Image: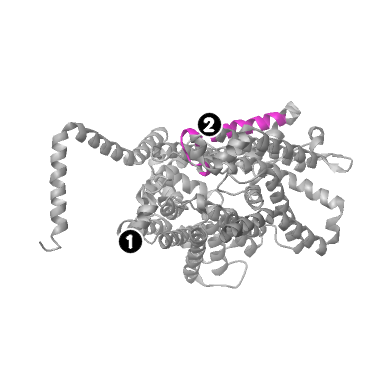
């Protein structure tokens, strides 16, 4: 009995660990650099987090099911290239086209995963290669810079309303939509059930394969949306634009407390995780850590967070 | 009856009973068993058939493919993927995955370039740098294995982390630049050719690694244990195989092979930088999987990986001969992974795939 209450206590602490970490980090950076706590800086932080948050939100759906998506950075880069190439001709239609390509890519990866029974990390790794290759071919292996006329279509990304950057508002819309998807739809509930115990979910009549495919479609679509926004913020499209974002995105999900084994997690946790990653990044820049060497910290954070959040009872044999 | 005779006699009786049984059931039992064996044999030869067909088609389109110069080019392109593939094969045989390959390779290449005669500092260790680099690779692999086993973290997550840590450390060491290698002996490892056949020494080094891997796989306890773990870890552990130690040793071994890959890459390019590993993970996994080693573990081996590497390298060589841009090749490799895995998975065995 004592052991039981103790384990519940630990679980409860574990649940609030990410939020506590975020608060401590914000205070720590704020003490070292008081300007950090000004509203304008915090809004800038939120704006800088938006792309990471959208990528992480997409992959949260997949991780909830117990899968993984290693193609998101290639998808986001491809979508930035698609936007850069078609925005002059299609205008706002280019954004729709980019997200639609994302949905199709996600559908194909999901189908390869469930129909051929290919493990998700290898199916999405392969799909990532195909997408990267496509981006290289259509961009002729070059970065495409957008002109003034084309940037006019991107005001919804680059502008601001009453001092709040539009990107933050887009991020909020994504947060609300994703939260509703996760907590108020059958898909959300089913994916939590599948992540918690796939045989039980299957036995109780959940169409497991369909939910999985939906999750991969969502993940790739959100990644494509992140690519669209990245193209707006950087006024360019390139096949390697998002190359550095895979690790931070997965780290954000895991640091937020979503278990890599699936079943436990939420979009809110991912938001907290994405903010933690952003604050850590700003803190490291402030401390003068080489921007490339920051990957050392993210890699270590990823491993530690997985080790803490993983549900070992669910995997008798860890491979 | 002396105890030593007992097992034999039991075995004999067992055989006799089985033979009788088979005779009684006649063709009903014997025929499907035979076809199953034959199909299995065919499946394990499929990569070789694919390789031969591929060579025939490319040679028919462009006869230059069969020139000696092109053979050297293929061997040279295959040496690094082969060495990397050997390491990855041991991990995949256990049913795990190692994504840290690019990290270890980059780190090894950068450290090698900093220890030998170079354009950035005063070090001049020459060939002595090689054992140090191999130790670094072993160290990273050991860390991978230890975290994976002791903290029970899935291997793809651990190695995803160490991939970026490796590249990050390499970057921190050189600060985003490249270090030129001025040591002629080290460069000769990958470039100079042997006087008899005319292959670069690196190719022979890679083949030596292949032989070592083959011996480890077939004739050492570690190799057999790795197969046993891949075939069914719970059973293997129950029959007394030290599963944790085997896993850690396999990851360490893989790290050493990646370090050899890093040495060859640095020697070939004549420099160490943080982009030296880019895209190599993808090629390596394609090669291992196309060779017929199953991701679920227990099936395949380094001999299959040799064929897989040749398929991947010959295909990209053929695409170059046909004037197809290299950027398309990554996409083709992606499709190859999906097709190969889809064909090789024994899907009846597993209902849950994550």
At a point 42% along the width and 35% down the height, the residue shown is: B62
Residue A161 in magenta stretch: no
Residue B14 is marked as: none
Q: Is residue A211 left or right of residue B240?
A: right
Residue B221 is marked as: 1
Seen from the viewer's position, the closer of residues B201 and A148 is A148
Label 1 chain ID: B
Q: Which residues are magenta?
A: A94-121
- The secondary element bearing badge 1 is classed as helix
Residue ranking furthest to the right = A162
Residue A108 in magenta stretch: yes
Q: Is residue B236 above or below residue B183?
A: above
- Does any portion of residue B188 appear in the rendered image? yes
At a point 63% along the width and 34% down the height, the residue shown is: A102
Quadrant for the N terminus of chain A, please. Answer: bottom right
Q: Is residue B147 left or right of residue A290?
A: left
């Amino acid at each position: 009995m004592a052991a039981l209450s103790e384990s519940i206590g630990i679980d409860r602490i574990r649940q609030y660990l990410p939020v506590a970490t975020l608060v401590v980090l914000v205070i720590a950076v704020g003490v070292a650099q008081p300007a950090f706590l000004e509203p304008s800086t915090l809004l800038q932080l939120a704006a800088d987090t938006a792309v990471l948050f959208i990528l992480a939100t997409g992959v949260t759906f997949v991780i909830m099911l117990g899968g993984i998506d290693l193609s998101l950075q290639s998808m986001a880069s491809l979508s930035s290239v698609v936007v850069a190439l078609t925005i002059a001709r299609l205008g706002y239609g280019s954004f729709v086209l980019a997200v639609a390509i994302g949905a199709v890519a996600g559908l194909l990866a999901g189908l390869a995963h469930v129909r051929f029974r290919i493990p998700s990390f290898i199916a999405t790794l392969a799909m990532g290669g195909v997408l990267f290759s496509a981006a290289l071919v259509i961009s002729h292996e070059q970065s495409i810079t957008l002109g003034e006329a084309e940037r006019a279509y991107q005001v919804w990304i680059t502008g601001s309303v009453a001092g709040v950057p539009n990107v933050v508002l887009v991020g909020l819309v994504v947060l609300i939509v994703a939260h509703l998807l996760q907590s108020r739809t059958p898909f959300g509930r089913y994916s939590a059930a599948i992540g918690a115990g796939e045989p039980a979910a299957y036995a109780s009549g959940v169409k497991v394969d369909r939910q999985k495919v939906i999750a991969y479609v969502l993940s790739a679509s959100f990644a494509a949306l992140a690519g669209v926004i990245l193209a707006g913020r950087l006024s360019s499209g390139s096949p390697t634009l998002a190359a550095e974002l895979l690790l931070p995105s997965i780290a954000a999900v895991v640091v937020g407390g979503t278990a890599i084994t699936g079943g436990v997690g939420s979009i809110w946790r991912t938001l907290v995780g994405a903010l933690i990653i952003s604050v850590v990044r700003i803190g490291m820049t402030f401390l003068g850590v080489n921007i490339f060497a920051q990957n050392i910290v993210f890699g270590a954070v990823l491993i530690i967070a997985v080790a803490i959040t993983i549900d070992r009872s669910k995997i008798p044999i860890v491979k | 009856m002396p105890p030593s005779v007992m097992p034999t006699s039991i075995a004999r009786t067992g055989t006799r009973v089985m033979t009788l049984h088979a005779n009684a059931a006649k063709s009903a039992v014997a025929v499907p068993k035979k076809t199953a064996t034959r199909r299995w044999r065919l499946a394990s030869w499929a990569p070789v058939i694919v390789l031969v067909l591929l060579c025939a088609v490319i040679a028919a389109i462009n006869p230059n493919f069969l020139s000696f110069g092109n053979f050297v080019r293929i061997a040279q392109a295959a040496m690094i993927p082969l060495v990397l593939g050997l390491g990855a094969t041991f991990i995949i045989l256990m049913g795990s995955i190692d994504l840290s390959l690019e990290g270890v390779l980059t780190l090894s290449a950068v450290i090698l370039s900093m220890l030998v005669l170079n354009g950035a500092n005063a070090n001049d260790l020459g060939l002595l740098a090689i054992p140090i680099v191999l130790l670094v690779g072993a160290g990273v692999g050991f860390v991978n294995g230890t975290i994976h086993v002791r903290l029970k973290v899935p291997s793809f997550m651990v190695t995803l982390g160490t991939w970026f840590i490796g590249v990050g450390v390499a970057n921190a060491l050189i600060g985003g630049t490249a270090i030129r290698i001025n040591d002629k002996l080290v460069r000769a490892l990958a470039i100079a050719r042997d006087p008899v056949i005319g292959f670069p020494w690196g190719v022979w080094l890679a083949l030596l690694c292949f032989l070592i891997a083959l011996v480890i796989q077939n004739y050492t306890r570690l190799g057999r244990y790795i197969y046993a773990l891949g075939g069914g870890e719970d059973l293997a552990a129950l029959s007394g195989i030290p599963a944790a130690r085997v896993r850690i040793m396999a990851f360490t071994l893989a790290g050493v092979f990646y370090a050899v890959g890093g040495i060859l890459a640095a020697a070939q390019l004549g420099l160490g930088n943080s982009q030296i590993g880019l895209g190599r993970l993808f090629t390596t996994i394609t090669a291992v999987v196309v060779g017929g080693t199953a991701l679920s573990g227990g099936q395949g081996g380094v001999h299959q990986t040799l064929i897989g590497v040749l398929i991947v390298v010959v295909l990209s060589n053929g695409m170059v001969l046909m004037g197809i841009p290299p950027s398309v090749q990554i996409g083709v490799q992606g499709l190859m992974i999906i097709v190969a895995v889809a064909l090789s998975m024994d899907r009846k065995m597993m209902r849950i795939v994550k």
